[in-house]
Image (cartoon, rainbow, N blue to C red):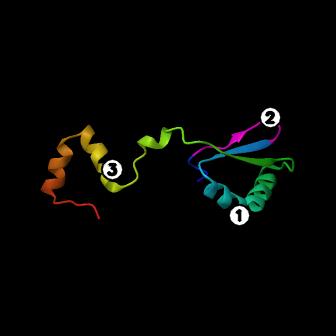
Amino acid sequence: MLLSRKPEKQEDQTIHFKLENPLQQQQLNKVYNALLGSLQKQLGNGGIKLQTEIIQNTGEDKGKLYTAEEKYQHLEKKNPLLRQLKQDFDLDFD
């Protein structure tokens, strides 16, 4: 979740997390104190604060490929010979 969008450091020692939905915010809230304490300790800065914001889907993940079939079809569009390779080796997606 935290790797999908990089947190942004703001001028007032605040780390701003952009989240995609309320579920992500609930998950972050569960580890909020541990995350904040760890960041303050590792960075040697007790004034760090965390801020979250749920953003609307901007459509940038529209192109993300999630399943093996989606990934294969994307690669096949780039290289049509992949279909022949799949047939030759009798490959399938489970």
Residue position for label 3: 70
**Mark with earlier residue (1, 3):** 1
- Residue type at mark 1: give it: Lys
Q: From mark 2 to mark 3, how far is it between C-alphas?
A: 41 Å
Would you say residue 19 sits in the magenta stretch? no
- Tell me where residue 84 appears, x and y as whole percent: 14, 48
Tell me, for residue 11, which label it has, or none: 2
Q: Nearer the viewer, residue 56 or 52?
A: 56
- Tell me where residue 50 appears, x and y as whole percent: 77, 49
Q: From mark 1 to mark 3, how far is it between C-alphas?
A: 33 Å
**Mark with earlier residue (2, 1):** 2
Q: Do the residues labelled 2 and 1 touch (CB within 8 Å)?
A: no
The residue carrying pointer 3 sits among few (fewer than 14), some (14 to 19) or many (20 or more) residues within 10 Å by Cα, namely few
Residue 13's quadrant in the figure? top right
Residue position for label 1: 30
- Tell me where residue 67 appears, x and y as whole percent: 37, 55
Main secondary structure along the magenta-highlighted residues: loop
- Tell me where residue 12 appears, x and y as whole percent: 83, 38
Q: Is residue 36 left or right of residue 70?
A: right
Q: Do the residues labelled 1 and 3 touch (CB within 8 Å)?
A: no
SS at circle 3:
helix
Residue positioned most to the right: 47
Residue ID at (25%, 40%): 77
Q: From mark 2 to mark 1, how far is it between C-alphas?
A: 26 Å
Residue 64's quadrant in the figure? top left
Tell me, for residue 78, which label it has, or none: none
Q: In this view, does 21 lie to the left or right of 59?
A: right
Q: Which of marks 2 and 3 is in front?
A: 3
* Stretch of the chain drawn in magenta: 5-13
SS at circle 1:
helix
SS at circle 2:
loop
